[in-house]
Amino acid sequence: MALCRDAILSLYRNLIRESKKWNSYNYRMYALRKIRHEFKENKTLQDKDKIKQCYEKGQETLKIIKKQVILGDLYSTRPLVIETRSKQRNT
């Protein structure tokens, strides 16, 4: 199965979108940095098997993030100081 560029970009967008839903600032920022880093690192991959392997890993990660976002919503905590200050500046 050859993966097309659109499928990979769609996975990237979905990972970013789901990660932004995380209530926890630390988890959210870690996930966003990690996703961007992984995609940048693998941007020049040519080996179809390696691309497929990375894509499948990304799909699994997306499932995990979706589950963790739901759990995070169930057990939410107060926003961190850094979050409240940045929101005050934006308003």
Image (tube, rainbow, N blue to C red):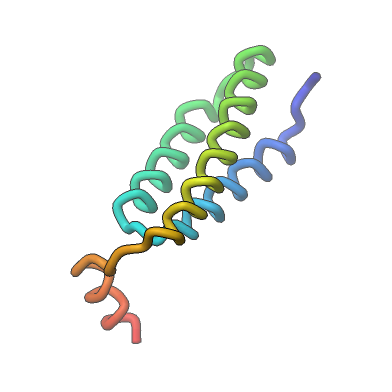
* 89 relative to 7 in the view: left or right: left
Rendered view: 56 above or below 12: above
Rendered view: 84 above or below 44: below
- Quarter the C terminus occupies: bottom left
- Quarter the N terminus occupies: top right
Q: Residue at x 23, y 65 (%)?
A: 80
Q: Residue at x 51, y 44 (%)?
A: 65
- Name the one closer to the observer, 47 or 16: 16
* 42 relative to 78 in the view: left or right: right
Q: Position of residue 90 (x, y in %)?
A: 34, 81
Q: Position of residue 44 (x, y in %)?
A: 55, 24
* 2 relative to 14 in the view: left or right: right
Q: Can you name the residue that lies furthest to the right here?
A: 1
Q: Residue at x 63, y 28 (%)?
A: 55
Rendered view: 6 above or below 17: above
- Name the one closer to the observer, 81 or 89: 81
- Name the one closer to the observer, 77 or 57: 77
Q: State which quadrant residue 37 falls in.
A: top left
Total numbered labels placed on residues in the image:
0
Q: Can you name the residue that lies furthest to the left here?
A: 81
Q: Position of residue 40 (x, y in %)?
A: 47, 34
Q: Can you name the residue that lies furthest to the front here?
A: 74
